[in-house]
Image (cartoon, coloured by chain):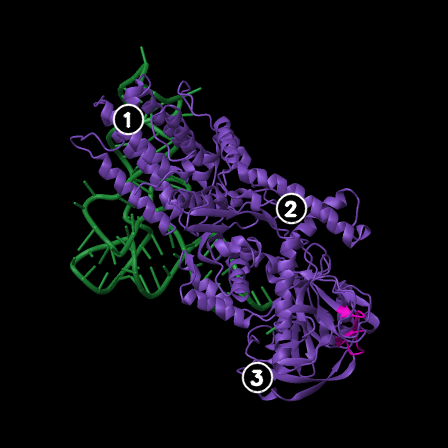
Amino acid sequence: MNIEEKSYNPNKTEIEILNFWERNNLYTPEYKESRKKTFSIPLPPPNANGTLHLGHVSGYTYQDILARYKRLKGYKVLLVPGKDHASIQTEVVFEKVLEKKGIKKRDLGREEFYKQCFDFCIINSNNIRSQEKRIGLSADFSREKFTLDEDLNRIVNETFKEMFDQGLVYRGKRIINWCPKCFTALADIDTEYEEEESFLYYIKYGDLIVATTRPETIIADTAIAVNPRDKRYKHLIGKVIEFKSLEGLKTLPVIGDRVVDINFGTGVLKVTPGHSKEDFRLGEIHNLPIISVIDQRGKMTYGKYKGLKVKEARDLIVKELEDLDLIKKIEKIKHSIQICERSKTVIEPLISYQWFLKTKDMASSAIRALEEEKIHIHPKRQEKNYVQWLENLEDWCISRQLWWGQRIPVYYCGGKETIISENGDITEKILGCGNTFVSLDEPKECPFCKSSKIVQDEDIFDTWFSSSQWPYSVLGGLNSKDFKEFYPEDVMETGRDILFSWVSRMVMLSLYKTKKVPFRDVYLHGIVLDKDGQKQSKSKGNGMDPSTFIDKFGTDALRLSLVSGNAADQDLRLYEEKVKGFRNFINKIYNSARYILLQTENLSSEDKKYIRENLGYRVKMKDFSIQKEQEKHIRNIEKLLEKFDIGIAAFNIQNFYHHTYCDIYIEKTKEYQTLDMKAELIYTLLQNIIVMHPFIPFITENIYQTLKEKDLITPLDTSLMYEKFPL
RNA sequence: GGGUUCGUAGCUCAGUUGGUUAGAGCGCAACAUUGACAUUGUUGAGGUCACUGGUUCAAUUCCAGCCGGACCCACCA
């Protein structure tokens, strides 16, 4: 720092310090190769399809605070960075990029699309990386991974092969959320609900009246369901009813199940296992046949309706039912429909062949790991959510009908074909010798019949299947040097919104693959909201760019704004005035250091030597003890960080430095103009910048370098990063 | 329907196993200040700690209920 300058200029200084850190290679654990105790965090990889937002910066700040703290405590620290290919999200984003150039995905073809999308992600990753560096994230960028790197693909495929060999994955007929526009199966998490005005049709099934919003699926009914506690219909359970229908006389069995809501409609439900998730489940329990009448384009496949869109068919069928006098009444209702999160298209629940992972045993291992306290979640109350989610977990559909991702390494001898029988039942037939096999390298022939005619599965893995293997894949797999040294890792720090979709799956897959938990502590942070407490979103236009805050107020100020005073798990509002307040605090630190340096400016080299050799608490004040206050403060920060009260710790360093150290202590020292007092000022300043360094690395490093230049301290290392946290 | 969370000063939020006078920042008012800090200091105003009960010598804190806001999961025929 230049003590001629009366106020702090964060931008200029921060860039200089970043260059200094990078030049000296301080982020890599090898910098202190001999350290024994390790501390590592697999950094949640941001999606390589955009830029960093404040949520990322908030996460990175927590991670970096822990890393820098542990370095000061003598640990060998590794933060491993990465980027996620984010399969469906990126595919949609990149399709839009292509669209602007007038190019369609299918025109490019699978291979070329993949190649261009890869390049697109590399460009984004480079941008993201420079943003990550700019916020002072002390990650070892030489170890950075992308989830579609060759070695990571290999690890993912190996995992799948193990699962396949052990019979943990299977290709099954399941009902899935199908998006007719994106042409893919979607996880529940990739869908959302929307209120829609619609009609409820009361249709006669003989003497029974069924209320439905989807009359077009009547032809795929395979049962009628009622609640066994419903006195009106109880006696019908187990019977078969015969009634006049669209297709003439029809018979359907009546089943009893408690999911049927007695108070909805007439209390009678038509069961269509081929086109409704709940009905599919009923079909499984009651062993009902499955009939499909809608295809993947969202068009009818049945009889004379063939080729019609669902809504067109609905109108036609309603008209026919009316003509047959089968409709009792039509009611207007509001109900919510499931839509694709990306394309906003109405989801069509369809039967399809997908790859599934049996999760039951993995889920119970993941629960056990928590119960045996091998994993701790902060805040603790989230543990309940974790357990509950795992307890109710169903088999995981890990295949997606997309191009952007790892292609499933399954091969069919001679290919396969899907057969829809006359009654709409879907089956699949493997051609050739009828065998399916998994191969890590591209196979030349079928291992069973030696035929060279083999076809790879078209599908790719669900993006979470690869990201759930992040804790060990990011280290380079089970045989790598880093894995041996750093696994299990120490902390997973991530948004509380992905506790289920990501954290619990990482635990499951890591336990499966490595027999160990991936990390010991999970810290969950909340969401960064705007000034009015609204979630940032593109559609609302209230998104905030981290770089505007950094340019205006500096990184240290932004880092504090994102964590200070915030308890784990809690959402946080961010706005300019807040960041400005922290900028003022950073300037206060600058000026207090400047004041102390001014006190020592004209000292002789002997006096400076005296100061260097006599750092410590040297002056007894009448009514105040900085030693007592300072030691209490340091212990408190230590305690808070050890139990992951990071936001409270950040709040306390500010409170202490500003109101105890500056307002009380420094003011009092003005009465004691001795060399011992100066030595004590230097000493207490050094202690404070060490303690504050994890939170605000730039200003503290800046002061440290100045103390070094002025020969006022005997440094332990090139950088403040490797000083010792005071005992 | 199941679960989580919040309600404390005008605003944004803390309050660490129950314990004197409930705190900070911003804002507001007054005073000081050629000061290390046009980005500072001191002082002050402002709170029935959402509401109602209970446990206790003692409740913002624990329990039950209730009102109001946010969120997650499941379901919506």
**Residue A625 appears in which quarter of the rendering?**
top left
Instruction: Indicate which label's residue lies in the foreground, 2 or 3.
Output: 2
Which of labels 1 and 3 is toward the front?
A: 1
Residue assigned mark 2 = A49
- In three-dimensional space, the C-alpha distance between marks 2 and 1, rounded to whole angstroms, equals 53 Å
Q: Amino acid at mark 1?
A: Ile
Disc number lying in front (2 or 1): 1
Label 3 near label 1: C-beta < 8 Å? no
Q: Which amino acid is tagged 2?
A: Asn
Q: Colour of chain B?
A: green
Counting the numbered discs, the total is 3
Please give the name of the residue rendered at 67% of the width and 85% of the height, measured from the top-left corner.
A253
- Whether residue A127 is visible, yes or no, is yes
Q: What is the drawing colour of chain A?
A: purple
Give the labeled residue for mark 1.
A611
Can you tell which mark lies on residue A232? 3
